[in-house]
Amino acid sequence: MKRMLPLAAGLAALLGATSANAACTVSGSGEVSTLSNAFPSLEVIARAMRDCSAGSVKVTTKLTTENNPETVQALKAAKSPYGLVALTNATITPAQAAGQLRPLNDFVAKYKAKYNIEDSMLIKFGNDVMAIAFQVNAQHLFYRKDILDAAGIAPPTSYDEMLAAAAKLKSTAGIEFAISGTYKSGWNLAEEFVNNYLGMGGQFFKDGSAEPAFNNPAAIKTLEVMKRLVGAMSPNALALDTGASAQQFMQGQVAMGNMWASRAANMDDPAQSKMVGKIAFAAAPTIMPGGKPATTLWWDGWAIPKNFDGDPELAFQVMMEGVKEDIVRANNDVAIWTRSIYKPGRFAVGTAASARAGAPPYPMVPQQALAHEAIGDHIGAYLAGQASAEKVLADATASYTAAAKAKGLLK
Amino acid sequence: MDRRSFVGFVAPSVLAMLLLILVPLLGTAWLSLHESYVKTELAEVRTTVPLFGGLSREDVRRVPQAVRDAAGNPVHVWNFVGLDNFANVLGLDRLGQAMAATPVRIGQLYRDVTSIEFWGALEFSLLYIAATTPCVLLLGFALALAVDATSRRVRGALIFASLLPFIITPVVGALSIYWLFLDNAIVNAGLQGLGFAKFYFLSGALPIRSLIILYGVWHATPFAFVVLYAGLQTLPQDALEAALVDGATRWQRLWLVIVPHLVPLFVFVGLIHMMDAYRVFEPVLVFGSNLYANSLQYMTYRILNTEDNYSKAAAASLLTVLGIVILLIPILRRMWRERQTA
Amino acid sequence: MKAQVSIVASAFRGGLLALWVFVAAFPFAWMALISLRSPVDAFAQPPLLLAPLSFAHFHQIWVIDGFWRQAFNSTVITVGTVGVSLSLGCLAAYALARYRGAAGFWLLMVALVFRAMPHVVLLTAYKPAFFQLGLWDRYETLIIVLVAINQPFTIWMLRSFFVNIPAELDEAALVDGCTRLQAFWRVIMPVMWPGVITAGLFSFLLAYNDYLISSQLMNGDHMTMTAALSNYMNANDDAVKLLTGIAGAVSVCIPLIFLILFFQRQIVAGLVQGAVKG
């Protein structure tokens, strides 16, 4: 059987790297199931966690991109079947607000030395450690260095520059739609709106409350810029998911766009990409002059459900086995790890530059997820030319209000 | 068969359906009349999150936090809310606004109403039924006639290929079609190779809806084909021969003998297909991104999973069931009449 | 003149059939083809006609990811569902075919409504209940749920087969001193096998192809093949994983293709039975 060599080598590297974790040293007994999203760093972590299965300890992992709804249900149930759940900025807040997570302070104190748990990994609400973050992620500029250099265009630092560059590439290089974006109607589109609206200096709620405040001139201006961007993307843009958008980069169909940092390494994988070494990274563009990069910083981490039907201490040890230094060291370029031994390479440039220029974290308030959902359901109609910006923002506000009332966050 | 042994024979099956279909349905009805959430109050919270390279950022703001009882457990609220969840699903307030707008313009009113999720989902579910049913019947019939007229040796292979779209896991089938229609994927490459301009199949409501309908026709045609093909095997030969003797043309035979014989089968296939089309889910999940197309079952799934609102999902479910009953009433009445006359 | 018409007609017929066979089979053929390619070739824009082939993705999903566990789960679930469905369904369908009272009619009507009901309606109620009771992620639970969902269709289909068996057969047995159950088991069932096989095939298809319920009620190691595909298909984060999923999807299709090859006659018979007796 003839193998595809680069692919097989990549897989072997991935496997080889983690089978070094045979030395899992957890004490206790019982079963720990984990639930998480499915991206490359989580695969690595899940494999390390499964290596802890031995004797009376059994670890099973479930990785699915549909993990959020299941996490929410598990946390709500009488007993959670999962001992560890992977959470993010957006998903931890509703769980924390509802008191569904177990504070980890005691375990952090006990295992701090053994696993070198660093302060920058702790997600704290007040004094309670609620999760251990293992990586950060953000959307930032991906661009084709070869094309931009050839056309004499500097990497765009604002959307205005990006649109001008797209126009120039269209007339001189014959690239009809030079921009790509994760604009699929729904969650992704809403994420773009959050990035851009915060970059425009907007805020989602009235100060210190859950009252919606995202129907205003800044939001309309944000939508208008997004519509101009959509005009420079493939007409299919509102139906292309992140994977299809990444394919556009890897197949050399587009020249610029905001893409997730977690996909940067794939651009240089010859098994997946025709553009190895040709794509460079930079801070996310700004949406208004003098503004901050229009992106939000995310973290990914692990938490223990309060209603876990098992030994939380064992779960905590399994968690730390998955994100211990050996794993980070062996898989340095798979993610932007939170541990200080991580060596930022070329794939971390965009996130670092965005963070340094003051990009905000994704808002950590429980009602944000509801606003995100409502916005994703409605603003697509404006970008597709089916309704006015005022109407879609009013509709999104109404949907948010209904959802927040149903969750008891608004009276 | 007497009543006692009837009851004995059907008991296990009825019990299973009672426990696992009817009871859940009643549970759904109960859920739909309530709301439940964890009681929260605004409190000042300081959060610390990692940014980059060992940096963290602190943030202090007032956010909703769980109200706790004496034992420290979050307080759950469970309220009877009457029909609020139904009003919520139906979007009654926005519906009212749309109706109250003056002057009344039918086009605008229609757009406003279908921009409400439920009505938009209902619109496309019905459109999907209306568009796929005739196509499925016609194409299935044409294929049945064509296969019936070919030699026996190739029929097996034809039937085999025809059954593929019907039998294979729908979500896989839908995905396999989606990939063909991406920006520079095979369909576009083929069209360009034939000299056509590049076409963006996912660029708007019309092409996406057409694709979903195309998928529906592709998926359901084999069913119509097989049933009608089987029906052709039972054609009354004497009637056909009599028509031939009378000098009837091909068309006359088709219209006067074959079609009338198959009418009950057309009705049957049409009904089954309508039932299945009403719960269209997979292609909407794969193509839809509910901006351009939504369906009742997809909407309920979204409310249940993404919006995480059991009560509202329950209300949406019951409205869907109500729709099915309305759709089935003509059939049930017909069957009842047939039973009365028999 | 007449000959010309029939040449045109048969050319038209041939064209229609060729086009249909192409349209019906092409998406699968293409999927099978790209499952053998490396990601950069599989999603090449513009698409490639020829590219190096390998079984790396199949090796990944079956050997490294242990898809055989999911295959085992699918086997348990489908065998369980088919067995229980048919046992309950045969008893009920036989009674429905022989009983003349109004209760039978109403039962069939209610079953018809249940048959038409979107599955997500049930999921709305199952999920909170099973999570509260801690009953999820178990073979029994999923089998029972699939049996219940499948029951209305099973009894409708089996009933139409039983109706075709002359009532004189069981009456003769009753006269000979058999009980109803004995008559059913010794006299009717032996001539019912074609119908049972057909109904069994449809139960199999439902259990095997179910995505919505299985993916929600089962977890990790207990997932069925179809449900486990979601772990790959949605993971569009990298094309390698997606292609592993496509290899999985092709693997899932292979038993179905064999099924069609071997049981084509029964599947057709089942569709026709449903049709003729409605």
Image (cartoon, coloured by chain):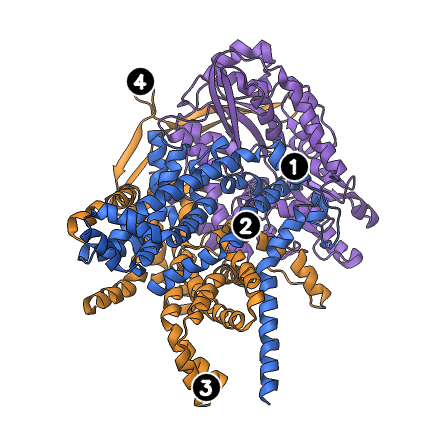
Chain colours: A purple, B orange, C blue
Q: CA distance from mark 3 to mark 2?
A: 42 Å
Q: Is residue A331 visible?
A: no
Front position among marks 1 and 3: 3
Residue on which the image places disc 4: B71
> Of B95 and C161, which appears nearest the observer?
C161
Whether B122 is drawn above or below B257: the answer is above
Front position among marks 3 and 4: 3
User: Which label sits on residue B244?
Assistant: 3
A62 relative position to C19: left or right: left
Q: Is residue A332 visible?
A: yes
Characterize the local packing of mark 2: few (<14), some (14-19) or many (20 or more) Cα atoms within 10 angstroms.
few
Q: CA distance from mark 1 to mark 2?
A: 21 Å
Q: Who's the residue at 57% across and 22% down the image?
A: A49
Characterize the local packing of mark 3: few (<14), some (14-19) or many (20 or more) Cα atoms within 10 angstroms.
some
- Callout 2 secondary element: helix
Kindly identify which chain the residue marked by label 3 belongs to: B
Marks 3 and 4 in Cβ contact (< 8 Å)? no
Residue on which the image places disc 1: C59
- Callout 3 secondary element: helix
Q: Are marks 1 and 3 on the same chain?
A: no
Q: Amino acid at mark 2?
A: Phe
Image quadrant for the N terminus of chain A? top right
Characterize the local packing of mark 1: few (<14), some (14-19) or many (20 or more) Cα atoms within 10 angstroms.
some
Q: CA distance from mark 4 to mark 1?
A: 53 Å
Kindly identify which chain the residue marked by label 4 belongs to: B
Mark 1 / mark 2, whichever is N-terminal: 1
Front position among marks 4 and 2: 2
Q: Position of residue C127 (x, y in %)?
A: 37, 37
Q: Amino acid at mark 4?
A: Ala
